[in-house]
Image: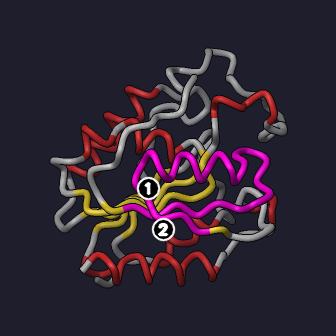
């Protein structure tokens, strides 16, 4: 499949993805991409985020492929049951935020996890097997999720895992505005879907 053959749903994490983030660039440059806009990116809720992702997927006109980053990754996995009948055929999951080890996270935009309103149901990582194809990309030096932990999660989720090397959280702070390597991997993932 090509990007034109699918509706691409961009699912950012906590505090959204800024204009220079690779997710925002993909949204601007991939014709069929659109961002899942949450009611509150700063105070996430597992249920509300999952419902919103399912609503966006349900409004798609083509098969759906999700591109999630950071806290968007567990949000997608938690919402998998809501998504399986919404035309979702794949999920490209990047740099998951491991909420079970959030006490090790650095400050994010000057804030610490959990937000002032609490963790919103993001207290433990989901362990359910995904009902659609998936690919997990994680750096071996990501401060938000260790590679060993990512290996365990990939096994539980039934997803292919790729080591992104020493690339941090794969965001603007780690030098990943455009992230051309990621776009190449995403293209390969799409080809494998059909």
Mark 1 closeness class: few <14, some 14–19, many ≥20 residues within 10 Å: many
x%, y% of residue 51?
Answer: 31, 34
Which residue is labeled 1 in the image? 35
Q: What secondary structure is marked by label 1?
A: strand
Residue 55 is labelled as none
Identify the residue at horizontal 51%, vertical 45% (top origin): 72
Q: In this view, does 118 lie to the left or right of 171?
A: left
Which residues make up the magenta segment? Answer: 134-162
- The quadrant of the rendering that contains the N terminus is bottom left
Residue 27 is labelled as 2
Identify the residue at horizontal 59%, vertical 53% (top origin): 151
Identify the residue at horizontal 57%, vertical 45% (top origin): 13
Is residue 134 depicted above or below 98 in this figure? below
x%, y% of residue 74?
Answer: 50, 41
x%, y% of residue 38?
Answer: 45, 38
Is residue 181 depicted above or below 123 in this figure? below
The image shows a total of numbered marks equal to: 2
Q: Are the residues tagged 1 and 2 within 8 Å (C-beta)?
A: yes
x%, y% of residue 126?
Answer: 46, 34
């Amino acid at each position: 499949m090509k990007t034109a053959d699918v509706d691409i749903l961009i699912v950012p994490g906590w505090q959204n993805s800024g204009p220079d983030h690779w997710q925002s660039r993909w949204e601007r440059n991939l014709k069929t991409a659109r961002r899942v806009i949450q009611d509150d990116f700063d105070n996430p809720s597992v249920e509300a985020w999952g419902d919103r992702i399912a609503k966006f997927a349900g409004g798609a006109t083509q098969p759906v492929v999700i591109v999630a980053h950071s806290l968007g990754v567990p949000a997608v996995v938690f919402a998998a049951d809501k998504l399986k009948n919404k035309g979702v055929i794949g999920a490209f999951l990047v740099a998951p935020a491991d909420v079970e080890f959030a006490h090790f996270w650095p400050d994010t935009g000057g804030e610490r996890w959990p937000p002032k309103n609490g963790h919103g149901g993001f207290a433990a990582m989901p362990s359910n097997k995904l009902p659609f194809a998936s690919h997990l990309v994680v750096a071996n030096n990501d401060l938000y999720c260790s590679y060993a932990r990512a290996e365990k999660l990939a096994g539980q989720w039934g997803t292919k895992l790729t080591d992104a090397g020493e690339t941090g959280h794969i965001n603007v702070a780690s030098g990943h505005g455009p992230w051309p390597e990621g776009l190449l991997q995403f293209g390969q993932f799409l080809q494998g879907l059909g």
